Structures are given as structure tokens and as C-alpha cells.
Amino acid sequence: MDKDIQVLGERVSRLVEISRRLADENRALKGRLGDAVAARADLEQRVSEARARVESALARLPISQEVEG
């Protein structure tokens, strides 16, 4: 019976260790996700600004009116 209790205690200890490790990893992943979301939002903003600049530049180009004859 003492052996069973010892084995059970070891299993519980391993489960607690694994649970702590997973909780730490989860916190780290949530932080990385937050960073990735912020970086994505920044990139979307930069792309939007670049698109606006390109559209503005295109609007200033003279329109070519080649006539086929």
C-alpha cells in the first residue's frame, strides 16, 4: 500500500510540474501572440499608407491619350 501511495505521489508531482510548465509556456505564447497581433496591425497600417501614396502618385500622372489612326 505504501508503494502505491508513493507511486501516486510521484505521478501527482509530475502532473504538477507539467501543469506549471504548460502554464509558463501558455503565458509566453500569449505574449508572443500579442506581439504578433501588434506587428500585424502596424504592417496593415503601413501597407494602407503605402497604397494611399501610390494611388496619389498615380492620380498625378498625366493621362496618355494615344489615338490609333
Image (cartoon, grey):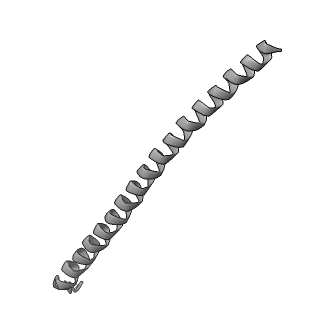
- Name which residue lies at 62% across and 33% down: 16
Q: Nearer the viewer, residue 19 or 12?
A: 12
Residue 23, given in percent of the width and then of the height, sits at 54, 42
Residue 20: quadrant of the picture: top right
As drawn, 65 above or below 54: below
Residue extending furthest right? Answer: 1
Q: Nearer the viewer, residue 66 or 69?
A: 66
Task: Please give left or right for residue 38 compared with residue 50 in the image.
Answer: right
Q: Nearer the viewer, residue 31 or 37?
A: 31
Task: Please give left or right for residue 3 compared with residue 23 in the image.
Answer: right
- Name which residue lies at 22% across and 79% down: 58
Residue 68: quadrant of the picture: bottom left
Q: Nearer the viewer, residue 53 or 38?
A: 38
Q: Quadrant of the C terminus?
A: bottom left
- Name which residue lies at 35% across and 67% down: 44
Q: How many marks can you see? A: 0
Residue 6: quadrant of the picture: top right
Residue 47, given in percent of the width and then of the height, sits at 30, 68
Residue 52, given in percent of the width and then of the height, sits at 27, 77
- Name which residue lies at 59% across and 32% down: 18
Residue extending furthest front? Answer: 2
As drawn, 4 above or below 61: above
As drawn, 30 above or below 7: below
Q: Quadrant of the N terminus?
A: top right
Residue 19, given in percent of the width and then of the height, sits at 60, 37
Task: Please give left or right for residue 53 compared with residue 22 in the image.
Answer: left
